[in-house]
Image: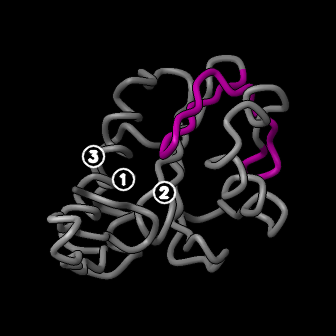
Amino acid sequence: MSWQAYVDSNLLGTGQVSQAAIYGLNGGEWAKSAGFQLSSNEVKEITDAFSNSEGVLASGVHVNSVKYLTIRAEENLIYAKKGAEGICIAKTNQAFLVGTYKEGIQPGNCNKVVEGLADYLKSVGYVCTFKIQCTKETNASFIVKYPLSLVK
């Protein structure tokens, strides 16, 4: 399935997401709905927000030239709104997904769709896994998931 098909079918096709996009963590655009565009500054703001939740909670987040008030920010999720409209941004290992909702769409439904696709992408192997066997003295082994994830 193409990235555009994920946007068209798995996000917009549900009727619970008004506009959507998938961007690589390096800033590259993978797919988007018509009329939806993130500027390079907006992409940087979003990628920075995942490592600075206090900052995005204080200053909000810009998406498609609209400033939203951040209501919740976690390591891999950002929820924000402006009036009756809002956004859900979910980070995967290599990309982030943005879904917007308009008045009449329940925020939780949009969040569920965006988070569900992000979880699916994580589950189908958009991760590189390495097993490292430590020395005899430590008697431990670890699985390192690239990027930035360590599982004991």
Task: Kindly state the secondary structure of the residue where label 3 is placed.
Answer: helix
The mark lying in front, picked from 1 and 3, is 3
**Percent from the top left, x then y, of residue 37?**
70, 64
Which residue is at 22% across, 65% downward? Answer: 138
The reply, left or right, for residue 39 in relation to residue 138 is right
**Percent from the top left, x then y, of residue 23?**
56, 69
* Mark 1–mark 2 distance (CA, rounded to whole Å): 10 Å
In primary-sequence order, the first of circles 1 and 3 is 1
Which residue is at 19% across, 62% downward? Answer: 123
Residue designated by label 3: 116
Which residue is at 77% across, 54% downward? Answer: 45
Q: Residues within 10 Å of mark 1 (few under 14, many from 20)?
A: many
Q: Give the quarter of the figure containing the C terminus.
A: bottom left
Q: Is residue 1 above or below residue 119?
A: below
Range of the magenta residues?
A: 62-82
Residue type at mark 1 is: Leu
Residue designated by label 1: 11
**Percent from the top left, x then y, of residue 84?**
62, 18
Residue designated by label 2: 97
Residue type at mark 3 is: Gly
Residue 39 covered by magenta stretch? no
Which residue is at 80% across, 42% downward? Answer: 66
Asked whether the residues under the numbered discs 1 and 2 touch, taking CB atoms below 8 Å apart as contact, a structural biologist would say yes
Query: How many discs mark residues in the rendered view?
Result: 3
The mark lying in front, picked from 1 and 2, is 2
In primary-sequence order, the first of circles 3 and 2 is 2
Q: Residues within 10 Å of mark 2 (few under 14, many from 20)?
A: many
Task: Kindly state the secondary structure of the residue where label 1 is placed.
Answer: helix
